[in-house]
Every structure is written in C-alpha cells, then in structure tokens.
Amino acid sequence: MKKLLLILICLPMIGFGQNTYQIAILKYNGGGDWYANPTALPNLIAFSNENIGTNIKKEPATVEVGSSDIFNYPFLHMTGHGNVVFSNSEAENLRNYLLGGGFLHIDDNYGMDPFVRTEIRKVFPERDLTELPANHPIFHGKYEFENGLPKIHEHDASPPKAYGIIIDGRLVCLYTHESDIGDGWEDAEVHNDSEFIRRKALQMGANILEYVFSN
C-alpha cells in the first residue's frame, strides 16, 4: 500500500500548477545538523513556484528517515555538516521509499561526504554512487548548466560533483558534493552571497524539482 500510494503521488505532472505538493526535510540520527539552512527550502519553493510553475506548499515538512510518513512526500531533501547514521530498519524504509517512486536529494553542506557514502551503501549495497555527466537532463531543464553542477561555495576549492543512484533508468537519489547549493538558497544575509550566485543556486534547485516532478 505504501508503494502504491507513493507511485500515485509521484506521477508526472501535466502542468505543474494542477497539483499541490509538499516536500520534506529528512531528519536523521548520528548527531549531524540535519536542520541546517532553515531558509533554504522555503526560498527554493517560492522561486520554483514563481518561475517554473510548480505548486508546492510554502513550508516544507520535516520527516524522520525511519517513519512511514516519508511515503507522503515525493521529494526529500537532506543536508548537514557532520555525522549521519541510518539503522538497518531506517535504511530499509528509505530503500522502499526510493524504489516505490520517491526521490532523495542530499546536499553536502561541507563535512557529510564520508558519512553519506557509508550510509547510502546501507540503503543500496548493490549500487554505487555514480557521477552524473554534464549532459544529464537534470542540468538542462528550464535552466541550462552546460558544465553540470555549479560551484556555489568554495570550501576545499574542489570541483563540484553530482552523483546519483539510478534504478531501472530512473535517478532516485541525487548527491551534490563540493557545490553547497543549499547555502545559495538561503536568505541573502546568511552567507552574503551575490545575487548572481544565489540565482544560479536557485536555478539549479528549480531544475532538480522540475526533473523530479516531470519524470
């Protein structure tokens, strides 16, 4: 029943504005700050509703990774700076959600990488996070990103990378690393990013939502 419900709410939209959706922040254990960037998703939602015709509720929900409530949301966003721990039951719950039609976006806010890779391995032990090429459709939606994932914050000055888990041709999990696009979604005064940087981050975020709700 959970999988059926999720498939129904994740059917592609014909005209974004015909349906109302809510997206959610994923709360996890391990001590990492899952609650980082509190203004990020509301700003992305507002930008997407205005510019690409989505009809997403203004405030995201918060849902625990082990809860059956994750099946109520077609899109989960996960971020933070530190440790992430999934129990076996949580990993199984997230796996069922993703196989049932859900989508997870993980944005490394700097410091998550080793933990994310370990925990995603629990969810899909038979799959590897695969780097997405610059020609992947997620970079060529409403907004064009010819070189792939944009760099928003420097951190280690490493190039931004987008990784994914692909099941039967469907991208079910997007992991953005060394980009920190979530910081670019935050209120302008939080990081003092330029309008150009913030807009680039919001445009990439809108592409992600467009991709999820159209595939």
Image: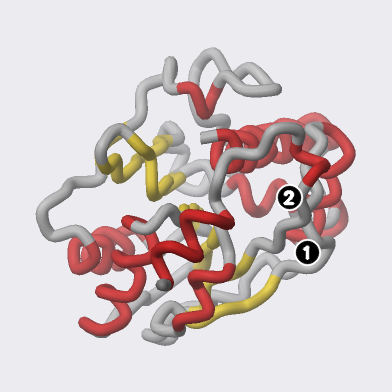
Question: Which mark identifies residue 39?
Answer: 1
Is the Cβ of the residue at disc 1 closer than 8 Å to that at disc 2?
yes
Please say whether residue 48 is visible from this viewpoint: no
Q: Position of residue 62 (x, y in %)?
A: 63, 77
In this rendering, the answer to whether 170 lies above or below 3 is above
Tell me the residue at 38%/40% (across/down).
171
Q: Residue at x 43, y 22 (%)?
A: 136
Mark 2: amino acid: Trp
Residue situated in front as seen by the camera: 195 or 50: 50
- Location of residue 86 in the rendering, given as x and y in whole percent from the top left corner: 30, 79
Q: How many marks?
A: 2
Sequence-earlier tag: 1 or 2: 1
Q: Is residue 139 left or right of residue 60?
A: left
Residue carrying label 2? 185
Between the C-alphas of marks 1 and 2, the distance is 7 Å
Q: Residue at x 65, y 62 (%)?
A: 23
Q: Does 54 sit left or right of 119 as displayed? A: right
Examine the rendering and report whether any part of residue 125 can be seen: yes
58 on left or right of 145: right
Rendering coords of residue 85 (x, y %): 31, 80
Assess disc 2: are there few (<14), some (14-19) or many (≥20) residues with their C-alpha within 10 Å of its C-alpha: many
Give the x, y percent position of residue 184. Answer: 70, 47
Give the image quarter of residue 24.
bottom right
Q: Which amino acid type is shown beneath numbered disc 1?
A: Thr
